[in-house]
Amino acid sequence: MSTGTLPGPPRGSVAGDDAERLWLLGVRHHGPGSARAVRAALDSRRPDVVLIEGPPEADAVVGLAADPELRPPVALLAHAVGDPARAAFWPFARFSPEWVAIRWATDHGVPVRFIDLPAANSLALHAERDARQELAEADPGEADAEPAEADADPAGESVPPEEGAQRDTPEGGTPEAGAEFGVPEDGTPDIVPRTDGTPEAGTPEAGTPDAGTRADGTPEDGTPDIVPRTDGTPEDGTPDIVPRTDGTPEDGTPEAGAPEDGTPRAHTPQDAEDSAAVRVDPLAVLARAAGYDDPERWWEDAVEHRGREGDDPLAPFTALASAMEALRERYGDGGHRDDAIREAHMRLRLREAVKEFGRVAVVCGAWHVPALRADATVTADRRLLRGLPKVRVELTWVPWTHRRLARRSGYGAGIDSPGWYDHLFSAPDRVVTRWMTAVAGLLRAQDHPVSSAHVIEAVRLAETLAALRGRPLAGLGEAHDAVRAVMCDGSDVLPALIHDRLVVGEDLGTVPDSAPAVPLARDLVRTQRTLRLKPEAADRQLDLDLRSDNDAARSRLLHRLGLLGVEWGRPGEARQGTGTFRESWQLCWEPELSVRVAEAGVWGTTVESAATARARDAAETAAGLDGVTAIAERCLLADLPGALPTVMRVLADRAALDTDVSRLAGALPALVRSVRYGDVRGTDAGALREVAEGLATRICVGLPPACAGLGEDGAREMRGHLDGVHAAVALLAGAHEPLRGRWAGVLRSLAGRDATTPGLIRGRAVRLLLDDARLETAEAARLMGLALSPGTAPREAAAWVEGFLSGGGMLLVHDERLLALVDGWLTGVPEEAFTDVLPLIRRTFAEFDSGVRRTVGELVRRGPSAAGGTAGGGGGEPGAAGFGAGLDPGRADAVLPTLRLLLGLPGAARDLEGDRA
């Protein structure tokens, strides 16, 4: 112990003969306490080489860690050559022990080597798993032949990157952040290893679900089951343990897919309680032994708040190694050969380093420390690695975010509070005071009144709570309670903001230009800098004025990236103005977009050329006419003139062959919007206009017969097409006025058709004509009277009313004749039909604004106007309902004094006083 080595390695093992020159530093992923301990141990022992648990391919780019432009959080990204979608990440934060070790080595000129299983093997093993899964799905007999393997390898089916979110492996087993992009739908981890592979605070690695799955269902150390046995069972013959489908709650309850009592299937009943705890989180086992119910709080008390100057730098690692030895003696490796393979490779690399260098330090998951000290021969280790599949891989650095380090993001080695851990690691002193100051600054930026007195009282309360709870120092829990009570007045709204902005954080790392990247990624970076459009991890709204050259270029870039599947920005509604020259985007750069950029590199070397090639291919492979028109619209928005000829050719061919009026009507609005955007952006949309006008003409000819005989669902769909075509024709009418007249004729034809045309369509046609002033109010009232006559079925009449009023209910407020017609029809509906009609009427009136509904209700309650007119009178005529009998000169003259006063005419005040008298 005095020498700083781990006690008792068996003779002949990796550490046996070289114990005085080898230090195994078992860590917890992303733990600031482990990071500080690693730095202290390296400063104390000064090794000649530092070995990191991660893919050996990273040796070629680890030197970039010395570049000041490589600022964490960052991640190593490995992807298969020719298939960038098959990728893996190994994230590092500033407080990650592995990052601290890398920076220490680069600062002191010490070589760094990565010793985990190569990414070339990991990605190839994943490909084999996918192939086996597809075979099992295609041939159930194959699955039945190997039922045990299905249990041992449940994570084989993964969601493709374009469909799923990040696939991050859980803590420890695979490279520290070695999760592959795209997580399986059942939440089970994928097979890509991580950088340090250990569970948090030395918990068992992935691959031992009974001893290491986290609360999200992934193994604690992050190692998914990489190479299942051929018969699906562990080497000792015990049945494999089936990982959970949805992950277990953080309280330690067993996850889905486990036995109801939480007992792992590979263990005896007396081990049930401990097995269930380890399965959820090995930290929970150690915390429970110490009398804690919260593993994170135990870790803070035992590690984060216990470091003292003068302590033995290796003491934390010795304690964690002892705990891991006890856990592995009890639970073994869970029957997952992936751990054995990875640990065999690490032992081989470790032996090479011990022979080549004098003093060796290994930074790895604490769970692996007993295995690295095991009595295993070189022959046995090489036998385990024999015959592993390989693929060609490329590896580089990419930016990462604190949000992606958080456990809730699906990252198996995630932590609950990356921002808080970063603060713990970076604050030189008075941690709680500095934290409260940062919280106060955030709340002030949000215009909340927070003073220095609030900060002082919050610090005092946090320290008092820590003393009452028997904690060595105030932690995040005490800080949260103090902030909520003192600064937030007991509200839960502001603490949620503090959690998102500070506890989790919005940091986004940076990568230097010298890092390897595909040409498309380099062009994107250059374009971002030219347009001053910096990627950020936080959501932010970007409002663009397309009349500005720079904003127009930004819009083109975002639309081109959207075509390539790189959804950096999502279109939204502009906060100011509604003109067509305005655009609004919601921007947020996520780490997996780096993978999308690499995937899109197959289309071209620049953003413009890649988007052009992608648009051409999308147009030729689009399923329907509406899909092609959508591509045409996006081409104009993205300003891709090179793609338009191909798109227009496909569009003209599809439009000429398509005879379905419904599909033509669905495609026209997007096509007309493209013409409109072309006009706004100054692009040539003449060819699009010709196609759009031709489609509109064909719709005018075919729409009336297409509306006959439709059912309720078909009528509702056609009503949507009717509205879309009406708006599209209005946009085209400026250059093609005869088209608008033809469309009005179509609407008149629909409005006057018999009952074979659904009432919903006929009522909507009447309303569109009325809104366009192509139909007199009296004529609209006549058509309504016919539709609501006693000879019309109540449901059909209700559908006519729904179509007529779907544009808004202000007509009923301003013309009581129409209101009287609706009211008279509704009161005359037979009792037996009323229950069928009522839901339709309620749905119609539910679309009105609350003020309109209230006014209509008041008019109905009041009944016919005092003028005593009939519903059939003309608007504004004496005797018409809702209108006076004529002009009252006395009442009109009463406003003249006030009007003169407003205009500042002489004597106005005197006249007004006289009137009042």
Image (cartoon, helix red, strand yellow):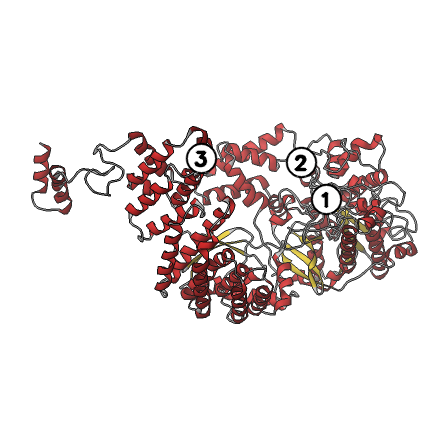
Specify few, some or many for label 1: CA neighbours under 10 Å numbering under 14, 14-19, or 20 or more. Answer: many
Q: Label 3, on which residue? A: 837
User: In this rendering, which labeled residue sits more in front, label 3 or label 2?
Assistant: 3
Q: Earlier in the sequence, mark 1 or mark 2?
A: 1
Query: Does the CB distance between marks 1 and 2 fall below 8 Å?
Result: no
User: Dividing the picture into quarters, in which one does residue 355 lie?
Assistant: bottom right
In the image, 507 versus 760, the foreground residue is 760
Residue 787 at x, y percent in the picture: 38, 42
The amino acid type of the residue labelled 1 equals: Thr
Instruction: Report whether residue 913 is seen.
Output: yes
The three-letter amino acid code for the residue at tag 3 is Val
- Name the image quarter holding the N terminus: top right
The residue that disc 2 covers is 297
**Could you say which is closer to the camera, residue 798 or residue 903?**
798
Q: Residues within 10 Å of mark 3 (few under 14, many from 20)?
A: many
Which circle, 1 or 2, is nearer the viewer? 1
| Rendered location of residue 757, percent (x, y) | 44, 48
Q: Earlier in the sequence, mark 3 or mark 2?
A: 2
Q: Are marks 3 and 2 in contact (CB under 8 Å)?
A: no
Q: What residue does disc 1 label?
A: 218
> Circle 1 sits in a helix, a strand or a loop, which is it?
loop
